[in-house]
Image: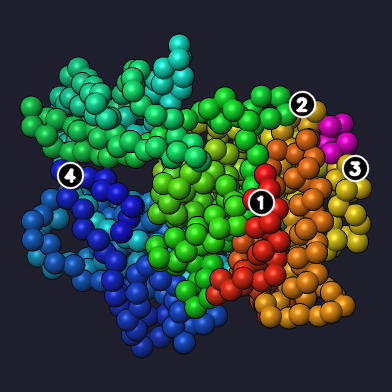
Amino acid sequence: MLRLFEQHRIRRVCSLDGMWNFKAEGSEKSYSLPVPGCWEQHPDFLSYRGKGTYTKQVDIVNGGNLRLIFKGVSHTAHVSFDGEEKGMHYNAFTPFTVPVGKVESGSHTICVEVDNSFGEHSALHIPNDYYTYGGITRPAAMEWLPDVYIEKIQFVPFQRDGLWHASIGVTVQSISTKEETIQLCARLGEESMVSGEISLPAGKTAVLTMERAFRGVKSWSPQDPCLYFLHMVLKRNGREEDDLIERVGFRTIQVSGTKLLLNGEEIFLKGFNRHEDYALLGCAIPLQLMASDMDLMQDMGANAVRTCHYPNDERFLDLCDERGILVWEENHARGLKLEDMQNPNFDKQCADCIREMIESHCNHPSIVIWGILNECASETEEGREKYKRQYEQIRSMDSSRPVTSATCRHFTDISLDLPDIVSFNMYSGWYQDVSAEGRNRQEIEWIRRVGGEGKPIIVSEMGAAAIYGYRDRSRCKWSEERQADIIRENLDVYMNDPDITGVFIWQFADCRVTEEGGWFSTRARCHNNKGVVDEYRRPKMAYDTVKEWFQKK
């Protein structure tokens, strides 16, 4: 299942999910592993880091222009079809497609060489405070394309004269050997749109923009997450040859002074940072457990989630759309020192991640903030330039959402004038034995002096660690009691401060961290244990503390 709704009624799409043959590099032994899945699920690969090859035989009844779809491969993929390499992709957390070309009916072989190793080739996947799993970790499919097809749609809603309008950008791609004349027809609710005839030269791309008012549609909001299907159909010679369906919502998100406004009304974000990580399953989380995570967060009163620290599985974003959960989605980069950001692959790999994230996820009404570069070298001039470049890339692709970045460079950050929202990570009572109130005032006053004056401020991370089941009457650190105490003190400060427009607890669930590097030395069990539930989603005492505070506001 690629999405939670049908995206095509004309284009043929076939799932590739199921069991694939797998061999680790240098081994002749074959395994049968599930896709989607992490190879760490298998007892022979519990901590395997390196390369492995997935192979699947497919029987094609009707040939045509074939394209392969991968929603996530961790972290580098080289894709071959019948022994011929067709494409490669870097980054576990963004989708990609691989054009195969014209394929005849019969039996064919798909091979995906997967690499989750660390090194210069990977600027973004490094030993970190979360685990880099290996495998085809998100759904996969194959689709048959006509000679001219719809590549993507970008839907941007806005209000004018009391009515909802939308700008709809449609990208059309030709793989024909001759010039083609096409027409686009769209329907949303009771409204329909038809373009004039479009001449498309052989092998070229065209972008058509439609704009119109939509009468009678309802706004999307957390209280009433109303969604609509936008069905775009491509006609050639009067015949319907291709289509694409996007699910959209009518809402605006904007910064007004120090406030964040949804549909013109002030909102306060009460959220969790959530890693895609589940005991035994790694990052390949099935829909049932995504929904369970959502149930638990909403039971505590959360209205927001931050996809730390990478773009999330689109099915999870679909759930957020359906349930009215506000999303801060960010590109993939966490805790990078300046020397890491000077990796020769860093700029391109970040730019690719941002482009793929926005092109794939821009139509989710739940996404209200784009984020970048969590806790990276924003205190340096060289780092500042990289922050600036990435903000500019996002704004050039989508100016309808504000941008931010979570900083931990307290009192040294020189980049706070660049984003629309200033966000900071603070662990008062855990890493620093200071009062949440005193440190918060100090932080806000500094933010105002160095570029954050007149901007909304979000506490992007706060929390403490606890080992599930460890209770101690002295309320020592690592006990469930101490974690609940620290979270309670921090929420009391942040949720009653008029200068704060949102708070995200670190974190929803415990997650695995890499043993490489030094993370193991401060992460008991080789896990980041700051979840209010553990990796099996068993609630700690802090669960009820969060529920008490989140349901107050």
Q: Which residue is mark 2?
A: 454
Q: Which residue is mark 1?
A: 550
User: Which region shows up in magenta?
Assistant: 444-449
Q: Which residue is mark 3?
A: 442
Quote the CA–CA distance across marks 1 and 3. 24 Å
User: Residue 334: x and y, percent?
Assistant: 66, 55
Q: Secondary structure at mark 1?
A: helix
Left or right placement of residue 295 versus residue 480 in this view: left
Q: Earlier in the sequence, mark 4 or mark 3?
A: 4
Whether residues under marks 4 and 3 lie with C-beta atoms below 8 angstroms apart, the answer is: no
Q: Residue at x 28, y 55 (%)?
A: 68
The three-letter amino acid code for the residue at tag 3 is Gln
Q: Secondary structure at mark 3?
A: helix
User: Residue 254: x and y, percent?
Assistant: 59, 27
Q: Is residue 262 magenta?
A: no
User: Residue 185: x and y, percent?
Assistant: 20, 27
The three-letter amino acid code for the residue at tag 4 is Arg
Q: Residue at x 10, y 55 (%)?
A: 63
In this view, 460 is above or below 415: below
Quarter of the figure with residue 497: top right
Q: Earlier in the sequence, mark 2 or mark 4?
A: 4
Q: Residue at x 90, y 54 (%)?
A: 435
Quote the CA–CA distance across marks 1 and 2. 26 Å
Quote the CA–CA distance across marks 2 and 4. 48 Å
User: Which label sits in the foreground, 1 or 3?
Assistant: 1
